[in-house]
């Protein structure tokens, strides 16, 4: 009787523990808590020199991106969870994600140059790889770039509205990073 009672208790605990496993979550579930850093690798197209700007989630310190008026840059975004690269998880669930770029106080033309691996089935590019043409890095006081990773939007568009590149209807914001901009 005692063995049966302990076995039943053990079995109940085991079922509870395994039923609550995060391993059962979909691959596309990537919450803000799972992203610790958003990194911009910005390559000067003329010199080939790459500068890395690392934003730590929920930080009050914003890295300041140095851009030169009249220059062109190729930019790659990397998402980290600690030391683990989460970018591939975003690509694996590309139809569930989209990046929005908001340049405040800067005149920068942005073009998404993602390849087919990071292009959604609706034809919209995620924005993990972009080309920036800097017209005027500092067009007003305190210029900044806000990058938003959107999850599960009803629809998305790469279209530019003012200084915002991309839009989404519905969905949730998985991550937001703010970078200062200077010339």
Image (cartoon, helix red, strand yellow):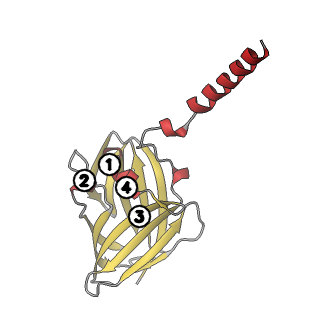
Tell which tag, 2 or 4, sits nearer the viewer.
Answer: 4
Q: Residue at label 2?
A: 119
Mark 3 packing: few (<14 Cα in 10 Å), some, or many (20+)? some
SS type, badge 2: loop
Q: Residue at label 4?
A: 88
Choose top left, top right, bottom left or bottom right for residue 16: top right
Q: Is residue 8 left or right of residue 158?
A: right
On the rendered image, what quadrant is the C terminus found in? bottom left
Q: What residue is drawn where x is 33% and y is 39%?
A: 154
Q: Residue at label 1?
A: 94
Choose top left, top right, bottom left or bottom right for residue 101: bottom left
Q: Position of residue 30 (x, y in %)?
A: 46, 47
> In the rendered image of this protein, does residue 93 appear above or below residue 87?
above
Q: Say which of 25 and 55 sits in front.
A: 25
Q: What's the CA distance linking mark 2 and mark 1?
A: 7 Å
Q: Are marks 2 and 1 in contact (CB under 8 Å)?
A: yes
Q: Residue at label 3?
A: 78
Q: Say which of 106 and 146 sits in front.
A: 146
> In the rendered image of this protein, does residue 35 appear above or below residue 3?
below
Q: Of label 2 and label 3, which has the lower sequence position?
A: 3
Tell which tag, 1 or 4, sits nearer the viewer.
Answer: 4
């Amino acid at each position: 009787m005692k063995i049966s009672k302990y076995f039943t208790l053990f079995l109940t605990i085991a079922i509870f523990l395994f039923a609550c496993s995060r391993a059962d979550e979909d691959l596309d579930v990537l919450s803000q808590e799972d992203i610790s850093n958003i990194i911009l690798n910005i390559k000067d197209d003329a010199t080939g020199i790459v500068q890395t700007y690392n934003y730590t989630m929920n930080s009050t310190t914003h890295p300041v991106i140095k851009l030169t008026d009249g220059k062109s840059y190729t930019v790659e975004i990397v998402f980290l969870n600690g030391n683990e690269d989460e970018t591939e998880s975003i690509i694996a669930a590309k139809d569930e994600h989209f990046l929005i770029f908001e340049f405040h106080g800067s005149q920068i033309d942005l073009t998404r140059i993602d390849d087919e691996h990071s292009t959604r089935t609706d034809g919209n590019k995620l924005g993990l790889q972009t080309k920036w043409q800097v017209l005027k890095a500092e067009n007003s006081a305190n210029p900044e770039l806000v990058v938003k990773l959107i999850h599960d939007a009803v629809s998305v568009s790469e279209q530019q509205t003012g200084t915002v590149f991309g839009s989404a209807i519905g969905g949730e914001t998985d991550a937001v990073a703010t970078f200062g901009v200077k010339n």
